[in-house]
Each structure stands twice: as C-alpha cells, then as structure tokens.
Image (spheres, rainbow, N blue to C red):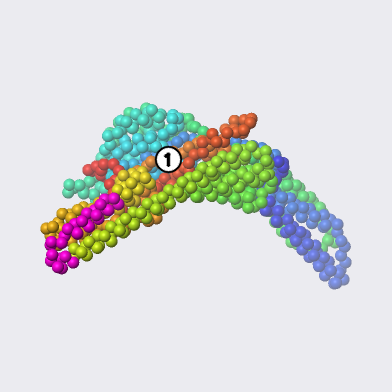
Amino acid sequence: MPQFILQNPTMLWLLPAVSIFVFLHLWRSGKRTRDLTAFGAKSHRNSRYTYQLAALALAAVFIILSLSRPANNPHPKLLQREGRDLVFLLDVSRSMLAEDLAPNRLESAKLAIAECVQDLQDHRVGLVVFGGSSSILCPLTLDKEFFLESLDRAGPDSVFHGGTRIGDALLKTCDKIFSGEEQGYRDIILLTDGGDQSESLDKAITQINEKSVKLIVLGLGDEKSGSRIPSPNEKSDYLIYKDQEVYSKLETGQLATLVKAADQGAFLAVGTRRMKLGEIYGRISEQEQTQQLAEENIIDYDEIYQIPIAIALLLLVIKVLIPNSGKTPATPHRNGLHVAALALCFFSFTQSMRAQEPETPADFFEAGNKAYLESNFPAATDHYQQALALHPGTPLIRHLTYNLGNSLFQQSKRSETSYESLALVNQSLDQYRKVLQQDPEDSDAAINNEIARLERKRLREVIAEEELRREELRLALENIKKQIEELITAQSDNLSSTEQLLTEQDQTKTTPLVEAEQKIIEGTRAATGFVKATAKKFFDSDIPEGNPLEKTATNLTTAEASETSATETFPTSLEEAKGHETAALAALKAALEELPMDPETAEEEAAQGEEEGEEAEPSEDGEPSDGDSESSEDGEGEQSDENSEAEGKIDFEAMDIPPPNDSPEDIINKNQAMQQARQSDGGQKKGEPVEKDW
C-alpha cells in the first residue's frame, strides 16, 4: 500500500495557472523594457528580479500542493459508538389536542421530543404512538432524520381507536422493540395526560421490570381546571359528551402510581410549563451505563499539509528579503501580489483545518462509512459510487469497491421485491469480483463473494417459485372467470325463458325452468367452493376480511341464495321467480367484476389484509463481513474471524442466509397502507373501542 496520497488531487488543476502567471509576468516585464528602450532609456537585466519571481511561483506551487491535502502513514482506525436504546411513547389521543399548552399538548410534546433527539449523540431512538390502540411509527434507529419524519406524521389518525391505553402501548414496546434477551441500556419516555383505560398495566410493569427498562413519565396538561378538547366535526367547536363540553385534566395520581411500581422510574408533572426534554433526560440518565451500538474499521492517514505551507511561507519571506535594484523595471503591483499570495496561503491553511464537505474520494469514502454505520445503505452506496467515479488512488480503490459490495448486499435485504433484491446482489457480486481481480488472496472478499452467490441462488429459487405460483394463480383465476361467465350465460337464458312464459301466461311449463335453475345452483356452489379452495391455497386463508377473493365469494353466495329462492317460487309465481333470477344474475355479474385477474394485484390486496404490527425481526446471521465499514446499528454484517482463518474448505452452505428484511420505511408504509385499505372498505378495526374515546 502506498505510503503517500493526495486526498484532494483536483486542486492540482491550479498548477497550470502558476505557469500562466509566470509567463504573463515575464511578458509584461519584457514589454516594459522594450518601451523604455524605445524612448532611449537604458535598461539592465536584474537577476534578483528573476529570483523573486521564482520564489513567488514556487510558493504558489507549494500552496496548491497543501490544498490537495497530502497525507501519509496509512493505519487502521477503530471507530466505536456507544449509547442507549430510547423509545418515546407518545399519547396521540384527542385529549392531547387540548390547548392549555401552546399550540396544544400534542404539538408541544412533539416539539420537545424533536429537540431532545437533536441533542442526543449516539443513542438509538424509536417512536410508538398510542390512543385506544398503539402503533410503531419508528423502530429503533440511528437515523435521526427518519425518526423526525415519523414524528412529524404522528397524530390522532396514526391509531385505529381513540381513548388512552397506556398498558397496551408499554406491552407492545416491550414485545416488539425490546424483544431481545439483553438487559439494561433501555429507556422509555412516556408523554401523556393520563387517564389509562387498559387492563394490562400490571402486566406491562412486570415486563418493564424484567427487562430492566427505565421508565420516565411526563404528565402534560392543566391538573386543576383542565381544558376543552377541539371537536373533529363542524357541529361544535369543542367535544360534546352527553350534552356537555368535555374538559381534559392531567391525571397525576395514576401516572405517579405507575412510576412507583417500576423498579427504575421517574415522574415529572410538567403541567402547562414548557419542558426541556433534552435536559430532563440528560440529568436522569447521566449516570447510566451505555452499550456499544456499533463499531467500524477505517483506513486513516496522517495529514502533512503543514510541510508545504511552511515551505511556501519560507519562500515568501525569502522573496521579500531579496533587495530590489534601482535599475529593475518598476512593478508597482508587486505588493498586491504579496498580499494575494499570503491570503492564498492563509486560505489553504484554514481549508485544511476545517471539516470539509465530501469533495475528494477520501471524503466520499468517510461519508459512505458514516451512512453505512447508520444503516442508510442507499446513501452509503451513492457515496462509494461517487468516490469511485473520481478515479481515486490505488489505496482507496480496494476499500471503496469492497464497501460498495457490502452496501449493495445490505440494501438488497430491504428491497420490496425479490427481483430488486436479485439485481442488487448481482451488483454486489460484481464489486467482490473486482476486489478479487486485484488481489485473489483477499479472504474477506472471497468469503463475502461466496455468501452473495448463495443469496443469489436462494433468490433465484424464490423467484422461480413465485413465478410458478403466479402462473398457477393466473390459471385458477381464469378457471373461476370461465365458470362465472358460463353461469351468467345460463342464468341469462333461463331469465329469458321465464320472461317468455310470463308473456304467454303459462304457469304449467315451469318444470324445465326449475331443472335449469337447479343446474345453475350446482354450478354456483361448485364455483364458490373453487374460489374458497383457491383462497386457501394461495392466500392461506378461508376468505377472511381483506382477502382479494372475499367479494367474489360473497357475491357467489348471494347469487346461490337468489337462485334457490327462484327455484322455490317457480311453481307459485313466475313474477316473483323472475325477480330472484334478476338478483342472481346481478350477483353473478358483480362476482365477475370483483374477481382480480392480475395475480400481482391479488397478492398486493392479500398483503394489505395482513394483521397490523407483525414486523419481521431482522436476522443477524450469514451476512457479509463489512471489513472497512464493519457494523450497522444491530451488528449486521459481522463475519466471524474463524471463517476467514479456518484451515481447509469453508462450509458456506452451513451459513444461514436471512430473508430480505423490512426497513423502517417499509414497516411504516405497510402499516399505513393496511390502515387506509381497511378504513376505505369499512372493515372492522383491531381492538375494542372505548366509550370515552378521547
């Protein structure tokens, strides 16, 4: 590995400007000499002037060299991040819209949380909102920007039911976010106005104590007189219950009891005062221990820009000390050049000292490592690619290419489809192969290359199974469509025959109509059974709410009931039978209209019908080792040293390649899609509503 690099080599493009400056200076001096000679004045060549110009030009060269940020002595450097896991539990019930805090309790709490998160250093933060039900808006993450975006979306519409169920929210936090076996290093900050309506508070406290979680409760609102709650409808400005306006007060008694039951608890009745949550949390947790959240190995260099700057200053001093001769052509602008050179030298020094935005391959490399450490893999990939596009020096090429492969592999686990995951895995393989082409003995790249190959093999098998499944589903849907179309044709023909008998007013010829209708009933019953069997096979359900075949099955059942009624009324009233047949025909047409003919559409509708909040927990096994950027927030990407140092053949088949994991954004988007789908379809909401749902 070369011992010397330029971390900002683009500054070398300024060197031609020095040559242009020297040329123009000599040309102007020569022109002045010729002009003096033309007027009869004598001019003598002064060697001191040449020395001054040379010193000035060399000083400019060394200043430019310092701007290119020379560095040497490459050495590995371990960066460690330590902190705690902090979950904010935010009450978004309608009572939090009371305006005894400006602008209201909820917005005041959100502002305090945002300020607190901005002040935190290396803590992982998460957000759970609750009312009559609870929802995870942001799992634990180091990405403050994503957390703040999730916080900004929090409101009464973020949960299904109104009310206040603190116990359920605490349980969800313990079960879903604090689900690991490790103890301690965990905090919950609960912001609420009280009024718990759950029955699971004792169970929640038991889990909090078992997991050694510190519980910090902040009570918001006026404790004495309370405040009215703005109404969500236009009938009244404020919420009305039993013909009286509802006043919401801070209920401190229950919150204080909650904190006393916790082994590690603190309660602060904020009331209507403005709270500085960052200071509150800092004072409470300043003596608490921290855990190592992530670590990263990088290649660091020692900056030596001071050497060329010192040489440049020395040359400028020498230039000033060289005496001028009276015979030298006058150059009144020379003092200005001195000032400009000194200013450029000072600018070079300050530029080298201050933290710079990514401009050089090394800068983009560091920015990529930082994004990788925060599990922002798309940003890390972008930084690594920009660094490679700048054609970095040999020392960085290996690290950039290797880390780019790791970032692409990690990004593949957060893709929405297997096809996107496969494309990203293929790109990661390309990067590992480039590293191996440079150094076939690179064990880290070789191991990660094999893991990525196994992942590619798995994804190809998954895609093949998905395509086969989609083809089978397509054929099944086409079969259902064909059956319903045949039933529609048969029902239309029988309805026409019924209308003809009505015209003839002949009640004695209904037997053929009854027989035909019975065949239609049998066909409808068979189609309904096939629809249910299809739902069971492809969506693993017996037509629950949200199943894409639910409406088709319902309409078929309705059609069968109408057909049965028509059969029973044929002997007594053709007019009534005609009405039942018409209803059956309409139900059959509705069943056909509601049938999804696109397998992907059917699968998307089925995904929206899944239960809320069942986020997949990420696996930590079988991921490529990160090398120069080793760890994400949960220790992803760690590769055992034993694998790289073991003698003999490594059993890559024994390594567990995890399925693609959902990113925090995926979890939030899926939850929102499911909520919108259920609400638009008028579906039943999870959990039981409460009478006082504010």
Residue appearing at x 70%, y 39% in the figure:
73
Q: Would you say 360 lies left or right of 565 here?
A: right
Query: 390 or 585: nearer the eye?
Result: 585
> Element under label 1?
loop
- Please provide percent x and percent y for residue 101: 33, 46
Residue sitting at x 23%, y 49%: 239
Q: Quadrant of the N terminus?
A: top right
| Residue 22 in sight in this render | yes
Q: Is residue 649 above or below residue 601?
A: above
Seen from the viewer's position, the closer of residues 391 and 7 is: 391
Residue 598 vertical placement versus 138 (above, below):
below
Q: Quadrant where the C terminus lies?
A: top left
Task: Return the x and y of residue 462 as percentages of the image width and height.
Answer: 48, 45
Q: x%, y% of residue 551?
A: 29, 52
The residue drawn where x is 54% and y is 44% is: 456
Q: Nearer the viewer, residue 533 or 15?
A: 533
- Near mark 1 (Cα within 10 A), the count class, few <14, some 14-19 or many ≥20, is few
Q: Kindly report the secondary structure that dominates the magenta region of the rendered protein.
A: helix
Q: Quadrant of residue 183?
A: top left
Residue 421, relative to residue 634: is it above or below?
below
Q: Give the number of callouts.
A: 1
Write the residue at 59% across / 30% down: 642
98 left or right of 278 in image: left
Range covered by the magenta-colored residues: 500-527
Q: Amino acid at mark 1?
A: Ala
Q: Is residue 546 visible?
A: no
Q: Is residue 511 shown in magenta?
A: yes
Task: Give how far across and how far down residue 303 sits, in percent.
Answer: 67, 43
Q: Which residue is mark 1?
A: 616
Residue sitting at the far bottom: 39
